[in-house]
Structure formats: C-alpha cells, structure tokens
Image: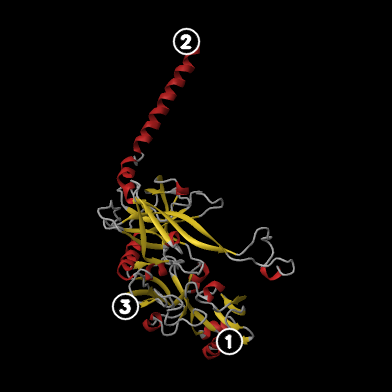
Amino acid sequence: MTENRRPMIMLGALMALLFTCVAAVASELPDFTQLIADNSPAVVKINTEQRVTNRRPPGMRPDVPDIFRDFFGQRPGPERERRLKSMGSGFVISEDGYIVTNNHVVDGAEEIRVRLIDRREYAAEVVGTDPRSDLALLKIDAEGLPVAKLASSDDLRVGEWVVAIGSPFGLDYSASAGIVSAIGRSIPTERGEDYVPFIQSDVAINPGNSGGPLFNLKGEVVGVNSQIFTRSGGSIGLSFSVPVRVVEEVVAQLKEHGRVERGWLGVFIQDVDRALAESLGLDRPQGALIAQVEPGSPAAEAGLEPGDVVIEFAARDIVDASDLPHTVGLLKPGQEVEVEVIREGHRKRLQVTVGKRPGDGESAASGSGADRLGIEAAEIDERVRENWRLPGGVQVTEVYPESPADQAGLRPGDIIVQLGYNPINDLSDYDRVVEDLPADTPIALRFFRRGRSVFSTIELR
C-alpha cells in the first residue's frame, strides 16, 4: 500500500512545485490594466471617405487590357462614382485638438471624422502631412481633451515591453502587448527613400491600427504604429512604428509650417562589406561608403569625396549605411555639424552645413526646380559615366510626388539616357527634348538604375 502511494505523493509534490514556479513567473510579468485605462481616452478612431471612379461596365472581363478591348467589342463605359471608406487610428497630443496619425490613413480623403472613446465625433482638418515619414497632423475643434504624453527620449531597448492601442479591423480601442524586437530598422519606400529608423516589435498590429500609439510601461508614447510585414493581411509578429524623436520633429514642423523640410547632404551611399572594409583600410565593416557626391551639394562644399567612409555624423555613430539618412533627415537645413570619415585608411574630421532637401514641402506643380516630367536633373558624375560605360545622360536628383516621373517609377539616382527616339547626352539635350515632348501621349523612356538599363513609358499631362 505504501509503495503504491509513493508515486502519487511525488506527482503531487511536482505539481505543487510547478504551480509555484508559474505563479512566481506570472508575478514578474507586467500588469497593463492601469496603463490601458489611463491612456485609452487619448486614442481616437479615424474614419475617412473619398470619391473614386470606375469605368468598367458590368460583365466586362477584367483580364482584357484596354488596348485590346476594341477587338473584343468591349469599350469602356461611362465613369461610375462610388464612395470609398477606410479607417485608422490616432492619438491626441494637445488639449485643443491636435491629433497625430499616419499619412496613409488620410491620404486622398475628402472627409475625415474623428471619434473619441466616449463616442463624441468631430470633423477633422489636415494641418499637414509628411509622406516620407508617413505621418500626418490633424486638428479638431475641441477643448479639454485627454492627451497622450510623448516620451522624452528614444532610449528604447530591445526586449522592453510595449503596448499598442487602436482599432484593428474596426474593433474599437483594442489593446495588444509585446516586446521591442529591434530598433533602427531600415525600410526604404517605393521611391528608394529611407528617413525613418523604425521600431520593430512583435505587438499584434493589424489594418485599422495604423496611426495609433505605441506605449512604454510608463504610459508614454514611444512610436506611431505604421507598417506590418505580412503574407496573409494580418499580424505575424513583425510590426514597425515611427520612433518618437521623428514624430516630435515632424509634428513641430507641420504645426508651424504645414510641411517638413529635411536636412540634405547630396551623396549616394552604400554599405561596407568585409571585402570593402579590408580594401579601404577598415578594421571591420562599418559606416556609410560614399559612392558619389552631387556637384554643388553640401557634401561637395564640405570636401567629402567618393570613397570616404562616414563613421560619425552630428555626434552620432554611423554603423550601417542606413544610419546616415536617418541622422541627416532629422537635422534642420542650415545647421552646421561635424562629420568624421575614414579616407585612405586615415580618420579625418570635416565641417558640413546641412542643406535643404530639394522639393521638400513642394508639389510637382509648384516646385521651383521641377520640369515637365516632375523631376530635378543634373549632369552625371564622370566616374559614374565611366563605370557604367554610358555615352551620356542626366541624373535624377529629385522626383516630385504624384508627378509623371513619379508615376513612371523614376527615382533619385536614376540616369536618363533616352526620351522617345531622342538620345540624352547632357542637360542641354534633356532640356531641349523635354520642352518639345507632347502631352497625353505615352513616351518611351530609357534610364539606368545601378548600372542596369531599364525601359518604361512616361506620359505628360
């Protein structure tokens, strides 16, 4: 009888020990209840509407391209207008009604409605937007609103607990928690721009969370939830948020000017791998290697040269190439800073006056430097011409949003060598050809991107 009871006693002891361990671990986990209760009133749901048109009549096969529809007796019918509704999240940053959200939440919206947790609703106006950081500042006519406090610094650490509050899939004021997975993540935009050192977390972020706040355990906003990586449309544990130091700088400029001006160097950079590090006299792969310096740019005036490796800029270490645009983009034009480079195996310090990025705060129609294509162009560097074996061409230095060039897929750094049947050898060729290009007609476009020839079409309006 005693022998039969011994295993049961041991099992009971093990179960008791297991429950004790689980209780001990649970007691060390954070309790989010008060944080969520205190901060949810400052989070808002944003509903938007815009008009869209559709020329496809009922019964038309969607897989038949427009240019072949005459052969199938399928001519586009009259335009049909419908209202497209979308939603997102945001949070109040001042008692008098300023609200932060994502640019993509309100982009193109003709009507914006903001709803608070107590179900009050307000019409919102757009104070300003910044597509490069995907941030927007709204204003509603209200007073005495609950406010979300921005963190005073961006000293987040990997492994730190964070909480998101928003309206995923329209489920109002949902909260989710996780940890910071990485900081300073580089995610270039479709235009190849990279100005945001994103916070990566495993917090569950889904459609509708966009623009909502990411809190630390102090109840301070450390980021704005902006993007997810997904194969299904839902969260798979890869979420990205705009860090608070970017938010503060962008919001301050939007509030004061309605637009954002960024620092600009005028260089093309690349990462340093092991082989490059060895050839450049570095003890390890580090920094941003300058591949090209634009003539007349702030970098050129400061004496930066192709082959320089930037390892420090404005007192910030440059570990990867992406760290440089993250740092420069947060500086104000006209600010003088110190840059440390490694040149021919030796360290060298230079002073550089940061310039204004061309086109910031301007549209293609209003930009002083934009041409009919919606770009700014410059002569190509002789080294690039020789390395890529080009007979000539002009280099794209700026592409204005929503311009014909933007819609054609051109990016800064591309080298245009042909428009229509006309070769482009230099700026004088380019200016002459662009002036004579017809409007509302697809025009053949040939350009080089990273040494590779690309054909496309562009249509001027």
Counting from the top left corner in percent of width and height, residue 396 is at 50, 79
Q: Quadrant of residue 318?
A: bottom left
Residue at the extreme front? 78
In the picture, the disc for residue 424 is 1
Counting from the top left corner in percent of width and height, residue 81 is at 54, 62
Taking the spot 31% from the left edge, 48% from the top edge, the residue there is 219
Apparent side of residue 358 relative to residue 230 in the rendered image (left or right): left
- Mark 2 or mark 3: which comes first in sequence? 2
Counting from the top left corner in percent of width and height, residue 12 is at 44, 20
Q: How many labels, in total?
A: 3
Q: Which residue is mark 2?
A: 2
Apparent side of residue 429 relative to residue 201 in the rendered image (left or right): right
Q: Which residue is mark 3?
A: 334
- Mark 1 or mark 2: which comes first in sequence? 2
Dot in front, 2 or 3: 3
- Mark 3 or mark 1: which comes first in sequence? 3
Q: Residues within 10 Å of mark 3 (few under 14, many from 20)?
A: some
Amino acid of disc 3:
Gly
